[in-house]
Amino acid sequence: MRNVLLITALLLGGCSVFTTTPQPPPPPTGQPQEINRAQSAGLSRIGSTTVTVRGSPDDAERALAAKAQAAGATYYQIQLVRETVAPGMWYASALLYRPAEGVQ
């Protein structure tokens, strides 16, 4: 019984790792900025985008930034960057955001 209580307490305590404290996003600039999950609170999601590129993970992230720029996003949050079955081909996805209406 004691072990069950200990395991339950550890599991519940571990869940707090997955909650984030909202943080303000950086000030908008002329280019989309990468943000993390905590900074996305209070922003309007305007869509998502994906890329598949040959090269490196950095190439995939740069391609996401370019697509965010083309979509008119102020911020983007990278969700996934992974190598595909084909060596040297990278797949990445991101969520696109802008400030909420009435918020500067």
Image (cartoon, rainbow, N blue to C red):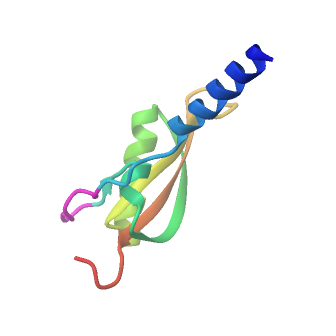
Furthest residue to the front?
1
At horizontal 40% and vertical 59% (from top left) the residue drawn is 40
Q: Residue furthest top?
A: 3
The location of residue 102, given as percent across then percent down, is 29, 85
Residue 83 in view of the camera: no
Q: Residue furthest right?
A: 1
Locate the N terminus by quadrant.
Answer: top right
**Residue extending farthest bottom:** 102
Classify 11 as above or below 97. Answer: above
Classify residue 18 by image quadrant. top right
Q: Residue at x 39, y 35 (%)?
A: 58
Reply above or below: 53 against 10: below
Residue 7 % position (x, y): 70, 21
Looking at the image, which is closer to me, 65 or 78?
78
**Magenta segment: does it hold 42?**
no
Picture residue at 62% right of the left edge, 24% below the top: 10
The residue segment tinted magenta is 24-31
